[in-house]
Amino acid sequence: MNTSVTKTLPLKNGIKVTRLEDWTDFSDFITERLDYRGYIWRGQQDITWPLESSFERAISSTDSEQIAATRRAHLKRFQYASRGRRGSNPFPPQNENEWWALGQHHGLRTPLLDWTRSPYVAAYFAFYKESKPNVAERAIFGLAQQSVHIRSRRIVKAAKDSLLSQQIEFVDPLLDDNPRLVSQGGLFTRSPDGVDIETWVKVNFEDHKRVILHKIAIPDTERMTSLRALNRMNINHLTLFPDLYGASSYTNLDLDIENY
């Protein structure tokens, strides 16, 4: 089956944008036209939103030293606030990023960005919530993990100490505190302060001939169709959030979407 892709823009600086007409196009595109095994995925409710963390969105400073100081203080407050609230004999986080991952699961604003190994799970998160007014397209992003990892290692190797933070880190924690992460096939990225991932790719893959970041746009009007289709694939809040919150959210959608 051929997909009726609305428009594919030329590859530029490692980024390709593909606009699809409907949900069926996405399914066909993933299964027939895109070798997605080397990519990790993220869905966003508005294609205009940058690929930046909740911590980045919460702070207004652009001064790198002030950002770093705010981040350290924010993490320290969470570490103290979480004492005695993780059950008996919890496995201790081994480093700063594991602390951030723990907080991310419980709603803390962190410098981490959620990704999944499944493009369909990413699509679910792109479409799950109702959009705000004037949102025309949802977005599913695919990031070439190995290529970004290799480029980040080169940056670290070539950089002076003051530039070590210009890499993108991949965070795949082994803690047992987050069953949702397992259910979602999840992992995180951590970007340099003040730099969203799309900008980082443009800077570090200028004139690159391979797709490093794939931005797939689907009309907002496809929300109900996509959620019904994903539910038939057993991709829903019941499977992605193995707790009472997931059960409640799954049940609520049945009221909102006909024939869910």
Image: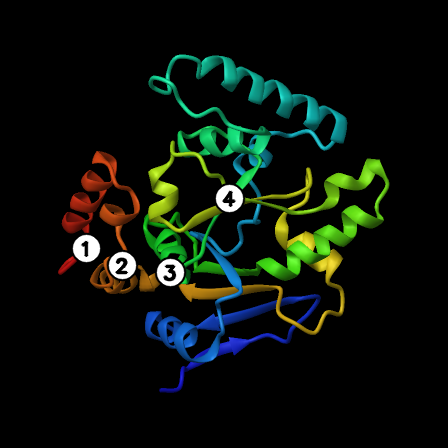
Task: Kindly report which numbered mark, 1 or 2, lies closer to the viewer in this rendering.
Answer: 2
Nearer to me, 19 or 157: 157
Q: How far, Cα to Cα, is label 2 from label 3?
A: 12 Å
Residue carrying label 4 = 172
Q: Amino acid at mark 3?
A: Asp
Q: Residue at x 68, y 53 (%)?
A: 199
Using the image, determine if residue 166 lies above or below residue 216: above
- Displayed quadrant of residue 66: top right
Q: How far, Cα to Cα, is label 4 from label 2?
A: 27 Å
Judged from the image, the secondary structure of the residue bearing numbered disc 4 is loop
Q: Amino acid at mark 4?
A: Asp
> What is the basis of the colouring in this image?
rainbow
Position of residue 117 in the picture relative to residue 206 (left or right): left
Task: Kindly report which numbered mark, 3 or 4, lies closer to the viewer in this rendering.
Answer: 4
Q: Amino acid at mark 2?
A: Leu
Q: Amino acid at mark 1?
A: Ile
**So how many labels did they put on this image?**
4
Which circle marks residue 227 in the picture?
A: 2
Q: Residue furthest bottom?
A: 1
Residue 184's spot in the image, x, y percent? 36, 49
